[in-house]
Amino acid sequence: MITNYLIASPHKEWADALSVQLSNLGLSYDRAFNGKEAQALLHKNNYSITLLDLELKNHSSLEILRYIKLSKLKTVVMFYVPYAGILNEYGMTLGILKRLGIMEVLLPTMTPLAIIKKLRHWSDPNVWRHIPFDPLKREEKEKSLSDDEFTKVNIQEALELGIAAFDHYLRLAPDKYVRVVHQGEPFPVSTIQNYINAGVEYLYFYTSDRLEYINLMNELVRKMIDASPHSDDLIIKSLKSVADKYINEAYTEGIKPSLIEEGKSFCNNVYSLITKDKDLHKKLHDMEYMIPDLFSHSFLVSFYSILISKQIKWVGKKTLESIAIGGLLHDIGLMELPEELRKDSPHHLDNDQKIEWEKHPLLGAKVLQGSPFVNEQVRQIVYQHHEYIDGSGYPNSLTALKIYPLAKIVAVGDGYVNKMTELKVSPRETFKAFLLDRTNILKYEPNHLRALAQSLI
């Protein structure tokens, strides 16, 4: 049985108020007034989100958290606390909460509608479909808002959406914004074109809307691929935008079920595009995203890993999804390293720094280990994507048969993309240089190199 939400709280007044709003919106939920009831319901049903009250008795909230983790239940956990300072009193930082599997902290000062907005953000990235334009919200005043609250989007990409699913802002200066497009209204083409002519490159939306943006872009890409004729260049740019926001969401907000589903949609879109256009790799050469930054790199690794997998008969749909998501997240461990190590190429590091840098696959696997939403295939890809069949890789110097099969595929994609961004030449010229380096022939499975060659023909 699947029910949307479980509210586990002894505070009847708070839980009643939230329950009324959920009912008004037609959302299903269950109630538990103590930990024992909550555990019984979790054992019986599947919940997208569980709201745990810190003050649960008869099985504490921490005992319920332990049960969720040990049972590998795929439920997002939110923690209701009586006041903000109590977490500090318990010595619980945000980092500790994330490791425990707690994605949000809820306070009594939050209204039921504010809590429901958080619930829907985590469980339903399709909420953008149901948002009407409110003509009363027309103020165009400069606001002092933190840069940390916003995600930027290329202004041309925003224009392609047609209707604004969220409010879009213009950044006037650090921490200074003005709203220029309102939620639910068409993008004003002439106004946006004036911004472009004036040299504006980006619009901004609230980072809290980023998952909905990923969902929106995935659907837009699917429709563009289905259309005939379609623009490959526009589709590729849109896919890259999805990948950028996807990776950023995973790094900053953590892994959640809806994010995994969007990764699968990304995979399906890439696969459909490759299937329809066998010469697509030719169009990659001149694209602006060849800049070797982390997000663009991850997009290309995922893209070429899917391209290779398409030539391998034993790779089925579910396996392909894991390869796509593993490719997107393969370098997530780099975010655990000091900034100076992340920014530099490993070739420019001294021996001590290189030892630290080579820990990133293990760090990435540890980041994902705490998530019940990431399968073991993805974790092993992240952990072993730098292992090579000749034993020259890291972190464990594994050899051929000991390396996870899917990690071998992503390793080829990673090595090939590294060579591409180093040489800045076409995909085919990159492949020639890739094979001329004899170490690559020794490091990678011959059938995977053959699959890459076939995908580029």
Image (spheres, rainbow, N blue to C red):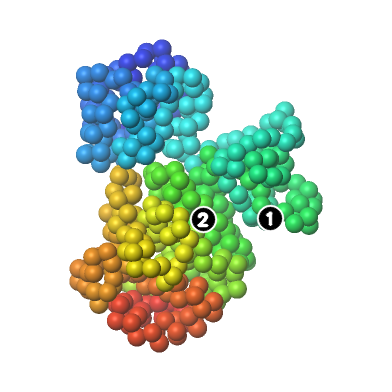
Question: Looking at the image, which residue is at 30% across and 51% down?
Answer: 366
Q: Residue at horizontal 45%, vertical 19%?
A: 108
Label 2 residue SS: helix
Q: Residue at x 23, y 69 (%)?
A: 397
Q: Which mark is residue 201?
A: 1
Residue where numbered disc 2 is placed: 244
Task: State how far apart marks 2 and 1 are (Cα).
Answer: 16 Å
Residues packed near mark 1 inside 10 Å, few (<14), some (14 to 19) or many (20 plus): some
| Amino acid type of the residue that numbered disc 2 sits on in the rendered structure | Asp
Using a 10 Å C-alpha cutoff, classify the residue at mark 2 as few (fewer than 14 neighbours), some (14 to 19) or many (20 or more): some
The answer to the question of whether label 2 and label 1 lie on touching residues, with beta carbons closer than 8 A, is no
- Residue 279 placement (x, y as % from top left): 53, 76
Taking the spot 22% from the left edge, 33% from the top edge, the residue there is 67
Question: How many discs mark residues in the rendered view?
Answer: 2
Residue 440 in view here: yes
- Which amino acid does the dot numbered 1 rest on? Glu
Report which quarter residue 201 is drawn in.
bottom right
Q: Is residue 204 left or right of residue 42?
A: right
